[in-house]
Amino acid sequence: MNFLSALGAITLAFCAYLGQVTELAAETFRSVLAGRIRPGLVLRQVSHIGFGSQMVVIVTGAFTGAVFTAQTFFQFARLNMESAVGPVVSVAMCRELGPVLTGLMVAGRVGAAMSAELGTMKVTQQIDALRALAVHPVDYLVVPRALAMLISVPLLVGECIFFGMLAAYLVATKVLGVGAAYYLMNMHKFTEAKDIFMGVTKGFVFAIIIVFISCREGLHARDGAVGVGRATTEAVVIASLAVLIGNFFLTMALNIFFPAGVSQ
Amino acid sequence: MSRIFIDVKDLVQRIGVQEILRGFSIPILRGETLVLLGKSGGGKSVFLRHLIGLMKPISGQIFVEGQDIAKFNERELEPIRRKIGMVFQDGALFDSMTVYENVAFPLRERGERHEATIARKVADTLAMVNMGGHEKKMPVNLSGGMRKRVALARAIVSPPEVILYDEPTAGLDPIVSDSINKLIRRMQRQLSVTSVVVTHDMVSCNHIADRVALLHEGKVYFYGTPEDLNRTKDPIIRDFVDGRSDEVD
């Protein structure tokens, strides 16, 4: 009975959490539809989220592409399939590694900053001050962050994919001795536009997951500095897990629209 | 026009298992300064937060110019909040903005786009609270009294009809407290606003109050003028007025 009541409590807490995130997303959507958009704040957030995250995304994409290429080469060389390294790495970067790595990096860098900033505002009554000044916190704080994430994350995914593929090409051709012509021909043959569409679509979905989880955590922070720390940790952990779990279901769903390798 | 601006009826609020307000009722008259006294943790600030819709009561009504705002949602409260300014206990200034940006914030949010007009109104308002010359400072670099002055400037820059003060003199030395009290009085004279001041500072109460209410065990225990309060022989009120506790030395 204790096990059942514990299970019930966890299920209820999960449903309540999901409800709060959904309600926040719905309120944000209503605000955007009503035109309560502050372009200056959106631009500032694009600069912070998009421009400021480039270095971490480029380095992550490039070194993951490089190491993935090396490992694939070591295995494929035993089968004399070195020229297949290009398509394997590029398809993996486009469909999985690019969006997932970008999602995790953004959750860590931007999600943490968002929940910490909103959490600090919450515990120091700055959000109450906004409300007292007749400014809805969702309009002022969440809408600019959500729009900036929707603009920035798909572009960051594209950047991660590009630098991953570039590093893979350089490692394969300059370090491991794969013929550049074979590498590029095979990569071009097996990598299609739909692979990139799939990656970018995942970028949109991950942006939504990260921004609403991080903002929800920040807006519900309490108990002072300890509460802000807790909210920040939870935002990163929950958003990262949601990206990884969501990625599986997204892959299965998007494979219906962008089936892998069918046209070859 | 009714003399009653805000009418609170049978307000009940609970925090956890503790019943903070137990049927709290009070009328707030247009143009008066009402001081709400009571022990620390007695529910004064909780009551103040209800007047601007930052908290919803478990039961009871809060009529602002005849409209029961207890039933309003966040969007419906916005027109009411434009009539009411609030000065939070520690100022609640936006710490990512300078003093100037904090005070300009309500003007920009209410659609003022002309930068020269904003600059003039901010300068005038900061001068009213004796904070001219501090425009470029960040809130973290201000003292407690200065933060309260800037918070007051932010609350009055777009002139409200009511100003709510949450412990305006708490944590300040007697001289700064006196200057804040004079400021509250000056605001009432210059802007003819209705003021609700939550405090446990009797000096402040005697200086600024037109009417006083004492909150005791979640209800209004006393309601009258400061003179009535100082004359009363009721032991509960006397203990509060004279600053006596039940503890033995």
Image: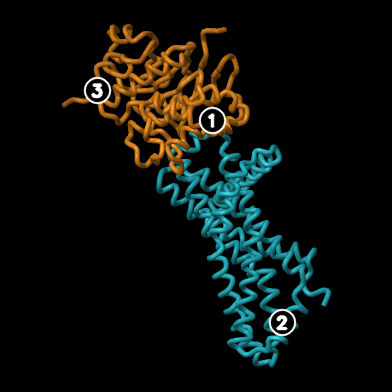
Chain colours: A cyan, B orange
| Eye-nearest disc, 3 or 1 | 1
Q: Can residue A12 be seen at all in this image of the molecule?
A: no
Q: Depth check: give the residue in front, A125 or A8.
A: A125
Callouts 1 and 2 in the same chain: no
Tally of numbered discs: 3
Q: Which mark is residue B245?
A: 3
Say which quarter of the image contains residue A120.
Answer: top left
CA gap, disc 3 and disc 1: 46 Å
Q: Is residue A179 above or below residue B216?
A: below
Position of the N terminus of chain B by quadrant: top right
Decide: marks 3, 1 in contact (CB < 8 A)? no
Q: Subunit of mark 2?
A: A
CA gap, disc 1 and disc 2: 59 Å
User: In what element is the residue under mark 2?
Assistant: helix
Say which quarter of the image contains residue A23.
Answer: top right
| Eye-nearest disc, 1 or 2 | 1
Q: Which mark is residue B91?
A: none
Q: Subunit of mark 3?
A: B
Circle 1: residue type = Leu
Q: Which mark is residue A184?
A: 2
The residue sitting at 70% across, 89% down in the picture is A81
CA gap, disc 2 and disc 3: 86 Å
Q: Depth check: give the residue in front, B118 or B183.
A: B118
Q: Can residue B35 be seen at all in this image of the molecule?
A: yes
Say which quarter of the image contains residue B46.
Answer: top left
Residue that protrudes farthest toward the right in the picture: A263
Callouts 3 and 1 in the same chain: yes
Read off the residue under disc 1. Answer: B107
User: In what element is the residue under mark 1?
Assistant: helix
